[in-house]
Image (tube, coloured by chain):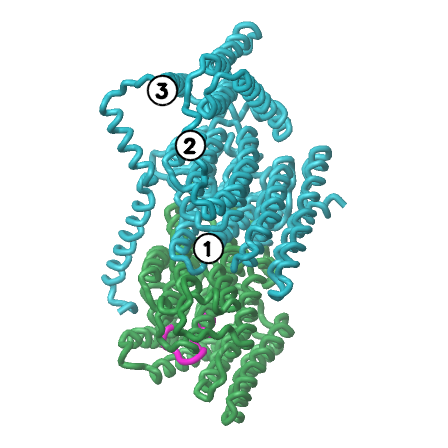
Amino acid sequence: MVTMMEFFASSLLTAVPLLGALLSLVFWSDPKRVKTCSIASSILTFALILGMARLLPPPPTGLLSLYLLPLGAMTSVLSHPLHEEHRFSWMVTLVCLGFGIGTLTGPDLSGSFFLMMLLVTIIALLYRHHTALWPMSWWGVGLLIFGLVCLGISMLTVPPLSSIASLMICAVLLPLAPLHGGYLTTVTRLPGNLPSFVVLLLPIVGLHQLSTILSAIPEDVVSVVNVLALVGALYSAVKALAQSRVRLVLGYGCLSFFSIVWWFVTITGATTPRTALLVGAIGLATSGLLIAWQVIRTRYGDDVDPQAISGLAAAMPKYAVVLSLLGLASMGIPPFGVFAGFMGLVLTSPQASVFGLFLVLGAWLAASWYIMQLVQQLLFGASRPDLRYTDLLNPELISLLIVVLVLLALGLVPSTLFSPEQAVQPQTTVFLESLAWRN
Amino acid sequence: MLQSFILAVPLFLLLAAGIVMIGGDTSRRIREKLASYPIGLAFLSSLVTLYTVTHEGPIAIRFYDPSSVTSLIIPLGLYVDRLSAVMMTLITAVSMIIYIYSTTYMYQDGHARRYLSLICLTDFVLICMVSSSNLMMLFLFWQLLSYLLYLLAHNHAHVGTLVGAFKTFTILRIADTAFLAGIVLAFQLYGTLEFHELFARAASTPITLSLVPGVDVNGTTVITFLIFIGAMGKSAQFPLHLWLPGSLFAPTPVHALLHAGIINAGGFLINRLAPLFGMSSTTLHIAFVVGTLTAVLGASMMLVQSDIKKTLGFSTIGQMGYMIMECGLGAFSLAVFHLIAHGLFKATVFLYCGNVIHKTRQDPHFPHTDHAVNDEPGFSRLTWSTGFVTTLFIPLLILLGTHGILHIPLLESQGTVIILFFIWITSSQAILTLTRLRAVASWKVSATMLVTLLFIVFNYLFAVESFTAFLYPNPDEVASYFKAAALPDWLFDLLIIGATGLTVLGWCYLYLRAHGQNVWTPSWIEDLRIRLYTVFINRLYADEIYQSIGVTAGHLIHRIDKLERGWSR
């Protein structure tokens, strides 16, 4: 039963970014004020979440996801260059933020409504920005529509059909092969700064949905998901290695890590604050890399080949340092959040099979190649004399530094801080006994 | 107060890195010089730590609650025992010398600031690693070290360096992943990553894993084997040694640090986990085989290199193989002694090698070869007799004396035989080198040989007795390691006899050559020698094999990618 206070807190948190979006329409003629309004709304939302977190019903995965969403929106908008063409994406960022928070904090029905609105917004944006050069994006739009239909089915039917339909939505949002197309489309085809925000938003929403339905999913389906997760982790790592376009490398890299999350979820049968930590850290690290790539696109064109840009370490030292740190975070090197989340899960989850564990470690290892290759291509090698190099501007530097610092904090701060109500994981002796492969 | 000294060691190094890194170009030289003071203070703090730990026992500083390691995902803390304190002193001492040398050596280098700050950061990471209070923290700094190695081996605009650095990172990550798997398994099986608890639980609850139906493996064997792969990576053991020659484009002081400090990480790891390794004879035997193979291949490749840095690089690989071999034989303290001696020696050689390279560039007649013309290797009855007596007769006398007169049951203790064998091999090697350098009739040469023998014997006795007692005060513990590492008697005897035979044969061959006689060898041996020379000069074609694997994997990945009509189209 939702209390009045919980309803109030949820409504206020949802309303602030949506009102911010409306307010930005008032300043529409002045891009600078639209951007300021978007940033201010994100900061206000973050401050309100900090202040009102205790009033909200404790989510099963902790409060970390809620904290990360406005931060992600803020850094995404802040890093984007000031231009009148970008006003729309800033405003939509706030709309998506509002719908995202509504989904996470709202009671069942309103949560589903906000999720529906979020999907509709993204589908409409993808439809609007579709180009004939990317026919594959129809497949992604189709999968998002499929997610929308599943959402409708889950609302109208009873278990087990509703649970399976909900699982499908989760697989679209928190990408799981073969339903990952929608996620890849959003990462590659959304306009402006939106990819760098949506890359964080969708998985967080997906994990939230998953945490609410996980217990109702039949065992057989969980087994299938387990296999899909392992295959998906390997498949997406291979795909990431084969890509030359940066956003696809990052998209498939994300998919590989999210598949690992799926595997952990299926073997433990639960989502914990550590799962949220890993999902949030992956999303944020990828968001940071997308922002960093946005910096390059702003300077050298939309679909620039990373191999054509080299030697940034000497010419753009600030950019080089931040990109290196983001690269480290994304490939799961300590002391950043991805490593902490990964270790948290891998240490506290009873392993169903050694084979599975080694496959997961293989996927983790593969990130060292595709991310490192990407970073090395951009940063090292000889600088090109025909290119003009401009190091990070202040807004870009600040937003990227925020991402790096948050990722660092996620790696060093105890996860219990984000979920004070949650009990610490079962003590080791308990799950020692539960290990099936011990003699 | 004491805890402040321990904490000061890494913090001083971090401060030094900060001083070099932060600030404008105008004050760069002053800051570089200034940063040497905190490094010096770190060394002094290490000395105080070593003194205190020796007298008062291990010290633990934890910033987390060990009973709930899961609440803090990366549990940070320091645990300093004698091993850690020795390593801290070694690292800070070598770092101080290298840093002071580097400030002058690299002052005109465009990347000096980056390298110097990275050297300080690497020292910081190394200190944190050797004083980690648990396996998780050790792994954290272990991984950071892998990345720093990648950065240290970097010269941004040089293609060869980029390839080498990427190879370094790739190989180290493979080893790190195995290490991680070992940690995960250790936690899954024993529920803790705290060193002492882990050792106690592993000893009290033997666990058997059934990886494949019908194949049961001891839990500690799997864990130690996986962790050993991690150690193989850092300590450049065959076949994960490829990164070391590939990183030789780095500046000379970086090499000094790499060969004197970083590469010892594998030996340190095995020593830190000695009680766990002592529970698995299989892993120790694997370590022995890998170490022996690396020592033989590293030394063979070293002999045929023409580049001074590569020669030293392969020499390090050989020495690391030697060190791992010692670990595999259960002589853990000997391995630490070895790595300290090697670290100091190699740092000196590398720092001097920079001068030699510079001198060679300035003076086309350098190195001077006139001594080779004047001092033809001759034959001196006195020198060769002394060599024979010191390397063959005296050791045999000692062996018979200890066995027959003192009634020490040598044959029952492989550990003692190993130590004696190492004494003999090392002194033979040193005396052989002396003979080859100056095979002239001189009492001085003969006296030097005897002094060398005494020096080596004393050193080994010191290593075996004093240093072992210092690092592992419990003699039963040391005996248990030797026992765990014991090889089957027939194999052990075969190895000793084989190695002795080869050494004596080598002596005879050199004797005859020095005597001006041609040594008849079958033609197939000559052919084999030439073939092996080609193989070793090409470094076993390992780089080509590595590249071929990379290309094949790339083709396979792209083929798989094309099978799926996905987003890459």
Q: In this view, does B449 lie above or below B54?
A: above
Q: Mark 2 points at which residue?
A: B295
Residue B357 is one of the magenta-drawn residues: no
Q: What residue type is labelled 1?
A: His
Q: Mark 1 points at which residue?
A: B154
Of A286 and A229, nearer the camera is A286
Residue A192 is one of the magenta-drawn residues: yes
Q: The green chain is which one?
A: A
Q: Name the residue under label 3.
A: B513
Crowding at dot 1, Cα within 10 Å, few <14 / some 14-19 / many 20+, comes out as many
Screen quadrant of the C terminus of chain B: bottom left
Comparing marks 3 and 1, which lies closer to the viewer? 3
Q: Which chain is cyan?
A: B
For the magenta stretch, what is the residue range?
A188-201
Indicate which disc, 3 or 1, sits on the residue closer to the N terminus: 1
Question: Which percent across, then down, holds residue B377?
Answer: 41, 23
